[in-house]
Amino acid sequence: MAKTKSLLNADHPLSIEEAYESRPRLWWMYTIVVLIVAALLGWSGTSISYHGLASKGMTIAQGIGYGLIHPDVNLLFNLTNEGVPYQLLQTVAIAVLGTIIGGILAIPFSFLACDKIVPKPVALIFRTVILGIRTIPSLVWALVWIRVTGPNAFCGVVTESVCSIGMICKMYITAIEDIDTKILESLDAAGCNGFQKIRYGMLPQIIPNFISTVIYRFDINVKDATTLGIVGAGGIGAALIQCMNSSRWSMVGAYLAGMIVLMILIELFSTRVRAKLARG
Amino acid sequence: MKKKDANASAVKVPLLDRIIPPKTITLPNGHTVRKPVSRAPFISVIVIAVIWISAVVTGFDFGIIISRGSQLGYILGRIFQPNWSYFGGDAANTSKLMGALFDTIKMSIMGSVIGATLALPIAVLSSTNINKNGVVVWFLRILLMIIRTLPTLIIAKFASLIFGLGTFAGTVAIVVFTFGIVAKMMYESIETIDMGAFEATESFGANKFQSFWSACMPQILPTYLSYCLYSLEMNIRAAAILGYVGAGGLGILINEFIGWRDYESLGAVLLALFVVVLIIENTSQYLRRKLS
């Protein structure tokens, strides 16, 4: 880049050919990247082998296709506990409570993990704890919590609360670090006390960020909650996996259709609210 | 908040302000200011109602956590005393853990690369500034949206039913997941690029592909690579649990150890995962900082 600039500033303007000749050349970097990726792929290929379809693979694929086109309409509009609407409601309920509890629990954690507020060693300890929480997959959390709460939707709620902490904290910390401290100084100069400084100087800066984070996480939690049922922690996953295991494809189709519609609605909702929050 | 009399009706008034009209305050200098009704009470009522319904539906019972919370402490305590025989203490155990760990890493690398490669052309086709064909754009976007709504575990379950148990099914699931997410992030960033260079190249007589390659690719390549790395980070975590539905990798061990209530071994698996995630995240974040 520097070379090009100095050429441009020279007395005579560059002809197109000269400018083209002096373009940055990065071929060696591209070659290295391609070689690394190729090497990684070659290594990865060693234990992933295609053994053809499973013995009933084709029938199952056809069944899935058939079920998705012909969902079980009875199940789709059935208002009992087995029906799609109730299962979806439970899934969303797990995500709502999990997100709210996680969002609240994350507040002290993120303040304690922010090295602008607490001493560096303390922040480091809390950051490690947060990373640890984030590394344990939600399914494992669910399996651990099941021993405490038993296999029910409440297990899903606690699981989601704990799992949300990791990511929410990460984004809270960024929001806290971005606080404009000049505002606090000017409030100080205007004679505000500590509480007023927090109420009028800090909260308006961080609350939109926090709410936006929580809504974003809610989006993820709904998706997570659909799979928690696989281990028995409530939500639509349990019914879905049972139907898949017993090859009742039109029921699978009904559950999937409900899930897809729900997820799309929630994504639209969350994008809209977050856009509104960002615009202020 | 000052209201102009001329085109007052043209301004869209929020529903709430039409039901309860805003309070008008006349300032000492004669100007009138309209103060809309506070939204806070309405939003809090809605939020409280949603929380209450959710608590009823999920059978929220904090008492259980207090009365049986010691169970969690017991399990976590055992997880935090990992079984070190999986790290070189016992040859069979070590090779079992390392095999599963490398399977997970291989699945996520392979899946990320294939998924991200497939995603690029689709992302180009579904960005409105390059593809002027609205029908194709919306068809692809809806397709991507549906793909993104499917949880990875469900895709893995389907794949393991169709392709049989093993790492291939897991790779398929990761390919689908990466494809959906990278394609979406890419078409969003392709739409923000500067199209001037594209038009200039086209006016020289280059065809669409040539002008995209020379004018748009340099702009999107860093973003694309950084999204690829980001999806690799996510995929390592996702791949770790795919084995739970029979799609190979660490998940098989996790399932086994929890079934046997062998939490020390589970701790060893999680520790291995933790280290790998830490290494890959830091490498990828370092590379992404370089890219931007």
Image (tube, helix red, strand yellow):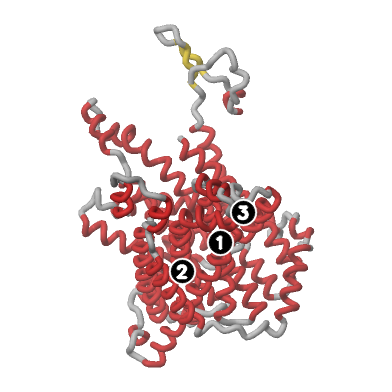
Chain of the residue on which disc 3 is drawn: B
User: Could you give the CA–CA distance between mark 1 and mark 3, rounded to whole angstroms?
Assistant: 10 Å
Label 3 Cα crowd, 10 Å radius (few <14 / some 14-19 / many 20+) = many
Q: At which x and y percent is residue B159?
A: 63, 74
Chain of the residue on which disc 1 is drawn: B
Q: Secondary structure at mark 3?
A: loop
Q: Are marks 1 and 3 in contact (CB under 8 Å)?
A: no
The three-letter code of the residue at mark 1 reads: Leu
The residue that appears at 53% across and 51% down in the rendered structure is B190
Q: Which residue is mark 3?
A: B126
Q: Which residue is mark 1?
A: B120
Q: At which x and y percent is residue B28?
A: 40, 8
Q: Secondary structure at mark 1?
A: helix
Marks 3 and 2 belong to one chain: yes
Query: Image check: A253 left or right of B154?
Result: right
Q: At which x and y percent is residue B285?
A: 36, 62
User: Could you give the CA–CA distance between mark 3 and mark 2, rounded to whole angstroms?
Assistant: 28 Å
The three-letter code of the residue at mark 3 reads: Ser
Q: Measured along the vertical axis of the image, is residue A36 above or below residue B122? A: below
Residue A121 picture quarter: bottom left
Q: Which residue is mark 2?
A: B237
The residue that appears at 32% across and 45% down in the rendered structure is A12
Q: At which x and y percent is residue B259?
A: 51, 80
Label 2 Cα crowd, 10 Å radius (few <14 / some 14-19 / many 20+) = many
The residue that appears at 75% across and 67% down in the rendered structure is A67
Residue B155 picture quarter: bottom right
Query: Image check: A40 left or right of B122?
Result: left
Mark earlier in primary sequence (1, 3): 1
